[in-house]
Amino acid sequence: MKKTFILCSVTMAAAALFVFAAEEKKQDEPSKNASTTTTEHQIITPSDLKWGEMPPGLPAGAKMAVLNGDPTKAGPFTVRMQAPAGYKIMPHTHPTPERLTVISGTFRLGMGNKFDEAATHEMGPGSYVVLPPGMTHFVSLTSESIVQIDSHGPFIINYLNPKDDPR
């Protein structure tokens, strides 16, 4: 009886160790559905930014730098947009929430189905706005500006008027 008890105890301990090791390995491996954001410490200074062209669907003339994630894939992402004075984005929506922070310049944001400069809200450095999915909005810049955008990919922009779509 004593040998049976010891054998059962050793078997249960071995099984527990096996299950624990398997769970630990599972937690260490990235999931196939994991987001594209980094899980490691990351510091980015303005001189580290790599400015490139805007993605299709946005007017030419602005630049974009990816800080985190990948706007073309599923998952959270953070980008910065640098655009000149006079840059405009006509009324559009996104299927995901959009969070904007003005880093520099004067960014004007309007809500509604028609572009109306008089209906825009002027946002200076430090201003922040959250746009829920499907909210129609438009943009106008009165000075060169840098805006940080946080959202969930893939990035999709749907213009209300197909003629406004630069694609």
Image (spheres, rainbow, N blue to C red):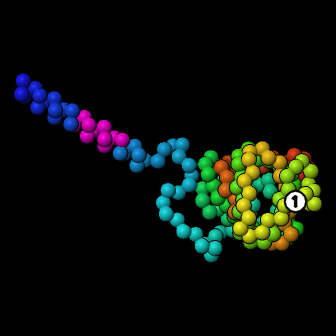
Which residue is outermost to the bottom?
47
| Amino acid residing under circle 1 | Thr
Q: Residue at coordinates 79% horizontally, 65% vertically from top-left?
A: 123
Q: Tell me which residue sits at (89%, 48%) in the image.
A: 113
In the rendered image, the residue lying farthest to the left is 2
The residue at the far top in this view is 1
Q: Where does the N terminus fall, quadrant-wise?
A: top left
In magenta stretch: residue 167: no
Q: Is residue 131 visible?
A: yes
Q: Position of residue 15 (x, y in %)?
A: 25, 34
Q: Is residue 59 left or right of residue 128?
A: right
Percent x, y of residue 166: 85, 54
Residue at 78% across / 49% down in the picture?
Answer: 157
Main SS class of the magenta portion in the image: helix
Disc 1 is placed on an element classified as loop
Q: Which residue is mark 1?
A: 120
Q: Residue 45 falls in which quadrant of the image?
A: bottom right
Instruction: Estimate the x, y position of residue 19 in percent, counting from the top left.
Output: 31, 37
Marks counted in the figure total: 1
Residue range (magenta): 14-23
- Residue 18 as seen in the image, left or right of residue 138: left
Confirm whether the magenta stretch covers residue 22.
Answer: yes
Q: Is residue 9 left or right of residue 65?
A: left
Q: Residue at x 78, y 69 (%)?
A: 124
Quadrant in the picture for residue 11: top left
Res 64 seen here: no
Q: In this orientation, which residue lies closer to the viewer: 113 or 75?
A: 113
| Mark 1 neighbour class, 10 Å CA radius: few under 14, some 14 to 19, many 20 or more | some
Residue 107, image quadrant: bottom right
